[in-house]
Image (tube, rainbow, N blue to C red):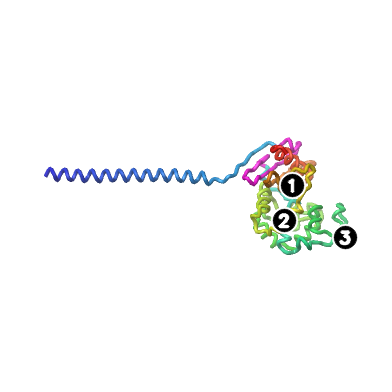
Amino acid sequence: MKRIFLFIIAIFLCFSMTACSKILIEQNDKNSASTSTSTYDEENIEAESVIDTDLSAYFEGFTGTAVFFKTSGTYIIYNSNESELQVSPCSTFKIISTLAAFESGVISPEQSTIAWDGTEWSFESWNKDMTISEAFQTSCVWYYRKLTDEFGVEYMQNHLDSLQYGNCDISQWDGSRFNGNALIDGFWLESSLLISPREQVDIMYQIFEEKTYINTIYIAELKEMMYKEDPENIVKIYAKTGSGNGGWYVGFFELDGENTYFAIRLSQQEGANGSKAQQIAENIIHEYFAGAIGL
């Protein structure tokens, strides 16, 4: 009887020890899983940083914002609140409509001349037959008005939706009569289409790093059209101005083997236009960026 009792106790102790071991193993497994998950999450955080920096000295009293994005993964932003504000792209939109025109087949880089209708414009450079390169360089609105009408609403809407360009709203196709003349008006000129400076930068990055559906031949043509001579011969800048209720300068520059995409936006105020935005951008590029690496 005593032996049977001792045998039962031994079996009970064996089961108890097995259960305890199982609990400890399961707990260790949970702890290991928890540690592994934590490490995995940390390793998969996007390698991107945002640096808020004071560039007000370059703005010379003008209100506005500056957004720069280095392809190594860093945003450098001045006045972050305004960087998220959607406004009219104005003539910076010629970057997008140029690509749309090429992609649609309405024109080609080799055959892009549109005849001047004889209307006398205050900009003498507009008063002639124009190629797309000439129209881009002189920011000729009548040329781009005819061009967008040629490939039409549906194609443009699909183009913008694919690029996720700002609010993608071209409902005011003919414009808001901002320029007072239907021949030089459109949805991109203080009308329905809106985009923020940060969105502009992201779009430039997507296009010129060849992350869109757009033919690389057309991107190369556009890049050549956007090239700006650098008086100091330090950097290569590719950009487009825009003027309306404020000023834009949008594009990218090549420095020290890296592309940096940017958008300078001046809010509506006296003297704010594309030329002023360009001047501010070039000063920042030369002093803040090139100066930092001793160029």
Q: Residue at x 69, y 38 (%)?
A: 293
Dot 2 and dot 1 residues touching (CB under 8 Å):
no
Please indicate whether residue 110 sits to the left or right of residue 36 in the image. Answer: right
Please indicate whether residue 295 sits to the left or right of residue 35 in the image. Answer: right
- Structural distance between the alpha carbons of marks 2 and 3: 32 Å
The residue type indicated by label 1 comes to: Lys
Residue annotated with mark 1: 236
The image position of residue 50, as x and y in percent, is 62, 41
The image position of residue 126, as x and y in percent, is 85, 55
Q: In the image, is residue 76 part of the stretch drawn in magenta?
A: yes
The residue type indicated by label 3 comes to: Gly
Residue annotated with mark 2: 220
* First in sequence: mark 2 vs mark 1: 2
Q: Tell me the magenta residue range.
A: 55-81
Residue 197 in sight here: no
* First in sequence: mark 2 vs mark 3: 3
Residue annotated with mark 3: 118
- Structural distance between the alpha carbons of marks 2 and 1: 14 Å
Q: Nearer the viewer, residue 99 or 82?
A: 99
* First in sequence: mark 1 vs mark 3: 3
